[in-house]
Amino acid sequence: MSRIGKAPIPIPGGVEIKIDGSEVTVSGPKGSLSAGFSSEMEIAQEEKQILVRRPTDQAQHRSLHGLTRTLIANMVRGVTEGFERRLEINGVGYRAQLKGSDLELTVGYSHPVLITPAGKEIIFEVPKPTQVIVRGIDKQAVGQIAAEIRAIRPPEPYKGKGIKYEEEQIRRKVGKRA
């Protein structure tokens, strides 16, 4: 049995969960998330926890078991704590700033790049001109927006210029030798 799938998901105080067949809606202090899962997985709420069970030991059911449990756990964590991705901008003249709720990046192109949040649940923060924080309640949306920001100017291996995740290590190359 899947170690991840069989672990119960604790429900913190202030979180409401509604299970309608394979549709799960989680509401909490930061907002509400809803997702549909495979109808083969059995999702049940018992006391102050959620349990996910699989019907058989087939490979497809085993893979769906852990995935379903993890996605529901991420929904619960998202509506209570939220998720964030931190990005760093390196390069002379490279910077970020907020224009209302949009993010404006000046990263070496002829015009600044404007990024609009995908929904009202995504929030940009710019504590320093070289640092961007993407926050939200949906883990997938936060990661997707952060990846799109990084793709605008990925870090290059010679000088390290570009946009990178805060924890990312750039593999540096030696330049030309005289």
Image (spheres, grey):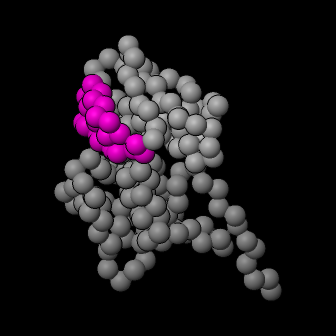
Q: Is residue 66 visible?
A: no
Percent across and percent down for residue 16 are: 27, 25
Dominant SS in magenta: strand
When asked about the image quadrant of residue 10, the answer is top left
Percent across and percent down for residue 51 are: 46, 25
Percent across and percent down for residue 83 are: 40, 41
Percent across and percent down for residue 68 are: 47, 40
When asked about the image quadrant of residue 57, the answer is top right
Quarter of the picture containing the N terminus is top right
Quarter of the picture containing the C terminus is bottom right
Between residues 68 and 26, which one lies in front from this camera angle? 68
Left or right of 161? Residue 35 is left
Task: Identify which residue is drawn at 46% across, 49% down.
Answer: 86
Q: Is residue 34 above or below residue 109?
A: above
Which residue range is magenta in the image? 16-39
Between residues 99 and 143, which one lies in front from this camera angle? 143
Between residues 28 and 9, which one lies in front from this camera angle? 9
When asked about the image quadrant of residue 28, the answer is top left
* Residue furthest out toward the top: 47
Between residues 143 and 151, which one lies in front from this camera angle? 143
Left or right of 22? Residue 164 is right
Q: Decide whether residue 9 is among the magenta residues.
A: no
